Amino acid sequence: MPKRVLQGVVVSDAGDKTVIVRVERRVMHPVYKKFITRWKKYAAHDEGNHFHAGDKISIEESRPLSKRKHWIVLGAPAVEPKPKVEKPAKAEAKPAPRRRAAAKPKAKAAAEAGGAA
């Protein structure tokens, strides 16, 4: 049986040679049919203390290394680089047309006209 490989984000690296990894998965709600994000934290073995909080990593199932730790850090997941797409040059941007000032409400205009007379 192949070993499971999960991807997650390191949330803690306080332990020696141990990182806590948060792995998220999306499941559909059985009644409302909306996708919900569920997550679980795993303790994984990081031999060289290379990874710190915020790093995205892959972990692999292994033999039990301690009471809670039975995952090993594989490293950063392979991410395909995005191809660069050149955008066509834009023509000179025209300034936005100026808008007239908003007209005063009738009641305020009448009060000012009445007070001046």
Image: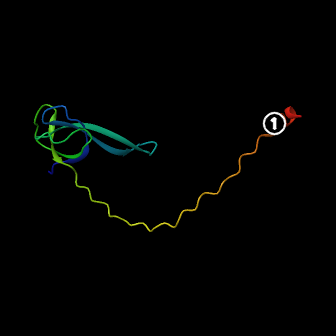
Q: Quadrant of residue 51?
A: top left
Residue at x 13%, y 33% (from the top left corner): 16
Residue at x 85%, y 32% (from the top left corner): 115
Q: Position of residue 57 (x, y in %)?
A: 22, 46
Left or right of 57 in this view: 95: right
**Residue ranking furthest to the right:** 117
Left or right of 36 in this view: 77: left
Image quarter where the C terminus lies is: top right
Question: Which residue is under mark 1?
Answer: 107
Under tag 1, what secondary structure? helix
**What's the coloring here?**
rainbow
Q: Amino acid under label 1?
A: Ala
- Nearer-the-camera pick, 43 or 82: 82
Q: Position of residue 38 (x, y in %)?
A: 34, 40
- Nearer-the-camera pick, 84 or 41: 84
- Nearer-the-camera pick, 113 or 66: 113
Q: Quadrant of residue 106?
A: top right
Q: Position of residue 26 (x, y in %)?
A: 35, 45
Q: Quadrant of residue 105?
A: top right
Badge 1: residue crowd in 10 Å (few <14, some 14–19, many ≥20):
few
- Nearer-the-camera pick, 3 or 116: 116
